[in-house]
Image: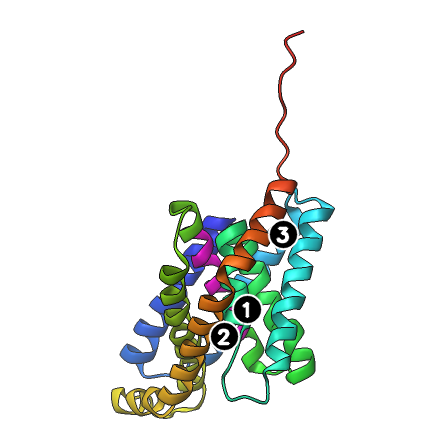
Amino acid sequence: MRKAIIALVVLIFVILGVLTFKYKGDFSWLITMSVFCILVLSYLYFEKSLLGTKEIALIATLSTVGAVGRVIFAPFPNIKPTTFIVAISGLVFGPYEGFLIGSTSAFISNIFLGQGPWTIWQMFAWGLVGFISGLIGKRNKHISGEGFSFICFIYGFMFDWIMNLWYVIGFIKPLTVKGIFIAYLSGLTFDLAHAASSFVFCIIFFEKFYKVLDRFKRRLEITYIKDDI
């Protein structure tokens, strides 16, 4: 199932590149449905997984924390602690858990901020943040706060550029390189605000969050020791 999700992620960009630019048609609905399928597969895998009640409660709690952080900072243009919260959750607990926390945070926060066609893309974008962070955590167990802050800075741009992609394929007609460039350029200041705030949140809170989450993760892990007596 995980391989299927990764394959669909790649398929989205292949479809976007081939169909939109080669055939010059309106395939925005197809791209959006592909993103939706990724989310559905993720939650179906979650439904069939062997996660216990503690793991499910953990995902729900961190998703709520991420959502609350976004709602609290909603008055400030593109200042989102959610990106950092999702990223460090994925770093500690793994790519799949990170994806669920990111996507669920977007859905919960939009209950208060407003649901719409953008919700699917926000769920995918923050889910991707958690997923990538989980892969980083598996490869690098001792990443520094400064190093991860730089990664969170990149996440800020990545999230907004994915949302720009939703705007581009949905509203720019005809789709041209110039139109895409202008669309991305017009949101650059907001992208920078998101990236900078994610960097700052990580610099300030990385050590505290990491220690708390890592301690909780260790409590979830059960090791069976064979009794030789």
- Say above or below: 82 vs 190: above
Pointers 1 and 2 in contact (C-beta within 8 Å):
yes
Residue linked to disc 2: 32
For label 2, the SS is helix
Q: Which of 136 and 166 lies nearest the eye of the viewer?
A: 136
Q: Residue at x 31, y 87 (%)?
A: 180
Residue linked to disc 1: 36
Residue type (three-letter) at the residue carrying disc 1: Phe
Tell me if residue 88 can be seen. yes
Q: Position of residue 136 (x, y in %)?
A: 40, 52
- Give the main secondary structure, helix, strand or loop, of the magenta stretch: helix
Q: Which of 218 and 55 lies nearest the eye of the viewer?
A: 218
For label 3, the SS is helix
Tell me if residue 34 can be seen. no
The Cα–Cα distance between marks 1 and 3, rounded to whole angstroms, is: 15 Å
Residue type (three-letter) at the residue carrying disc 3: Phe
Q: Residue at x 51, y 56 (%)?
A: 90
Residue type (three-letter) at the residue carrying disc 2: Thr
Residue linked to disc 3: 46
